[in-house]
């Protein structure tokens, strides 16, 4: 009569548990890596993307303080560049002293 070998159940359970644990750890690791790459890509896109309304407003303000222009033509108010205004102010203060 042929003798039947018994399966080593504790060994099979241990291998199954360790394999399951490793698969879970691997899945969590891959998900964390993916999310980090997505975050890096989004950060790169935001860093290289100019915020247009802010850029336009900054350019407009720079033009206002560096050029001669009418602030109110009807009242004959003119605006001068900030550098020229500072020079005039220093000259006026020098005359007063």
Image (cartoon, helix red, strand yellow):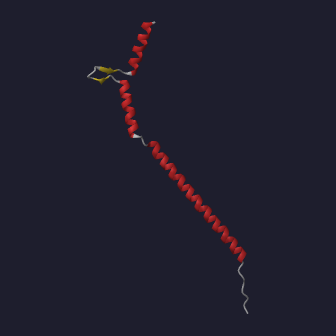
**How far from the left and from the top, in percent, is residue 2?**
72, 90
Residue at image coords 37%, 35%: 56
**How far from the left and from the top, in percent, is residue 85?**
39, 18
Q: Residue furthest left?
A: 74
Image position of 73 (left or right of 55): left
Which of the 4 image quadrants contains residue 67? top left
Q: Nearer the viewer, residue 20 or 85?
A: 85
Residue at image coords 57%, 56%: 32
Residue at image coords 36%, 31%: 60
Image position of 76 (left or right of 17): left
Question: Could you tell me which quadrant the N terminus lies in?
Answer: bottom right
Residue at image coords 72%, 82%: 6
Q: Residue furthest front?
A: 75
* Total marks in image: 0
Judge whether 79 appears above or below 55 on screen.
above
Which of the 4 image quadrants contains residue 82? top left
Judge whether 53 appears above or below 71 on screen.
below
**How far from the left and from the top, in percent, is residue 48?**
45, 42
**How far from the left and from the top, in percent, is residue 18?**
67, 67
Judge whether 6 appears above or below 48 on screen.
below
Q: Nearer the viewer, residue 8 or 88?
A: 88
């Amino acid at each position: 009569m042929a003798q039947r070998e018994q399966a080593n159940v504790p060994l099979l359970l241990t291998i199954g548990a360790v394999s399951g644990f490793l698969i879970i750890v691997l899945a969590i690791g891959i998900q964390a890596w993916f999310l980090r790459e997505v975050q890096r890509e989004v950060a790169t896109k935001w860093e290289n993307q100019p915020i247009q309304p802010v850029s336009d407003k900054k350019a407009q303000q720079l033009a206002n303080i560096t050029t001669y222009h009418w602030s109110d033509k009807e009242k004959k108010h003119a605006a001068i560049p900030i550098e020229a205004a500072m020079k005039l102010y220093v000259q006026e203060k020098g005359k007063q002293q």
